[in-house]
Amino acid sequence: MPADGLGRILALLSDGREPGGTRRLCEVAAEVSAASGAGIMVLADGRPQGTLCTTNSVSDLIEDLQYTLGEGPCVDAHRFGKAVVEPDLAAPDLPRWQAFAPRAVEAGARAVFGFPVRLGAARLGAVNLYRDRPGPLSHDQHAAALVVADVAAYTILLLQAGAAPGEVAAELEREANFKLVVHQAAGMVSVQLDVSVGDALVRLRAHAFRTDRPVADVARDVVSRALRLDGAADE
Amino acid sequence: MIPRQGWRCAGLVGVCPSHLAVQTLYRQATPTSRIGAVMPKEALLLRTLVELADNLVDDFDVVDLLDHLSERCVEALDVASAGVMLAAPGGDLQVVASSSEAMRTLELFQLQSDEGPCLDCYRSGDPIINLELSAADRRWPRFTARAIAQGFRSVHSLPMHLRGRTIGAMNLFRTARGALDDTDVLAAQALADVATIAILQHQVAADAHILNDQLSEALNSRIVIEQAKGKISEAAGLDMDHAFRRLRGHARNHSLALAELSRRVADGTLAPGSLDPLPPDRRA
């Protein structure tokens, strides 16, 4: 079993010196994958919307380049919904990202990895890892990066639902993994409000914050048709 | 890929001798079903094994494979409910397929990310057979209480492992008195083994990351299915079980992978109301 399961990654998140910020999530991403740096981009419809965090100036630049050029590992991971690995950016087996690659190499990135950040059909962004020397991620490092990507998805959702950055780590500890019923409810709410399932997840989470209940309880009420989020009672 | 409607394996004749042998046996066993009688248990088992073995020579979708596996377990074995849990890349066990899509059944499986026979079976790699729930309330208090409340009497968990690697576990629930017979236990483990081989063979000789990516993809697909069920449920006024049947029925009618169809419904590409309606006999 990989060493860095969800529990361990959440524990790492809350023992940061800076527990109030989302920056810790990027530090943890770099730590568990032995990367030189990490960044988490928020994307919508394939277009970069901004950054959640970066660990250093190279990660910053890697995100900026993708933001400006519209290509790179995060853009591909987001677009295709799967992990994108390039263990040797200076001499890749399959040349790609002709504008991005030379600039990223010049900045010091010799290997780059992108992991999609998503919750079902809700595609929220991508985790970006880089190393200053070429080489692949180990099996466990790759697995840990996938877990970090999941945590990033819940983090983005919590922030969009109105959680203060300082509350995110504690909220994740409480409800790191949504029950399937939450996703059923999100599907229902997306029809009720005519919004995407991603927006519906945010609305559900926000409703749970507002009424101070676990999101799974709110979801059960939606699924059993005791609660609708399109009524006046919600606002 | 699993035949989604009827039998479509004939094109594979000559591809794989052992596959062909099973297929011949299956054909010999099939006629009863063609005249509408109940298919004998042996024939159901053979058909299921052939369907699973089909994945060894063809491209496939993990969620479809496990959906079929749990559905067939209930048809072919003396059990009331079946479900499959896979380990996420971080090691947490999550539900991927269930023979019943009722919310309470899914939640019973899901509870096992914390406690229950599937989790113990996955951790130890050993099967748990014929465990009477009435005797398990100390071992798994929350799981046992829920399972008994749903009318189950005994539970069985079979590991999904191959060459020292465990990827998950299969759960079977019984409502009848008495033990599951040895033949059913053997058959269940055979089904779990073939499903495991089908999943693992995809990453043989390839990048070691592929299995993790594939499991992560399967678990995300399960979330997409739930989101699609929710949309159909709201748009058509169906409960979750019937919303799932409508989704699966449409997927099979149009030879689409369940996960791919769900994605189109969940991301808004396909309106939930445009899916084929449920056949009349499948309405509650």
Image (cartoon, grey):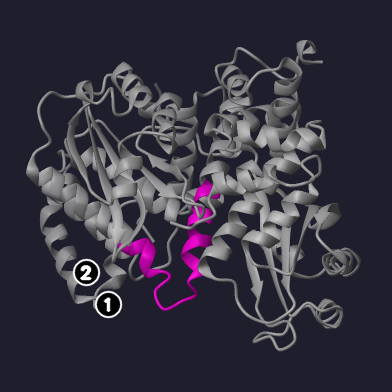
Characterize the local packing of mark 2: few (<14), some (14-19) or many (20 or more) Cα atoms within 10 angstroms. Answer: many
Asked whether residue B83 appears in the rendered view, the answer is: no
Asked whether residue A16 appears in the rendered view, the answer is: yes
What residue occupies the far front of the structure in this picture?
Answer: A17
Where residue B152 sits: x, y (%)?
A: 25, 23
Depicted B112 relative to depicted B203: above or below: above
Where residue B131 sits: x, y (%)?
A: 19, 32
Q: Amino acid at mark 2?
A: His
Judging depth in this view, the residue of B55 and B97 nearest the camera is: B97
At 48% from the left and 53% from the top, the residue drawn is: B257
Contact (Cβ within 8 Å) of mark 1 with mark 2: yes
Judging depth in this view, the residue of B145 and B188 nearest the camera is: B145
Q: Circle 2 — which element?
A: helix
The residue that label 1 is drawn on is B15
Q: Amino acid at mark 1?
A: Val
Q: Which residues are magenta?
A: B197-221
Judging depth in this view, the residue of B23 and B277 nearest the camera is: B23
Q: Chain of mark 1?
A: B
Say left or right for B236 vs B190: right
Q: Quadrant of the C terminus of chain A?
A: top right
At 13% from the left and 43% from the top, the residue drawn is: B184
Q: Chain of mark 2?
A: B
| Quadrant in the picture for residue B282 | top left
> Could you confirm whether marks 1 and 2 are on the same chain?
yes
Where residue B7 sits: x, y (%)?
A: 29, 56
The residue that label 2 is drawn on is B19
Cα–Cα span, label 1 and label 2: 8 Å
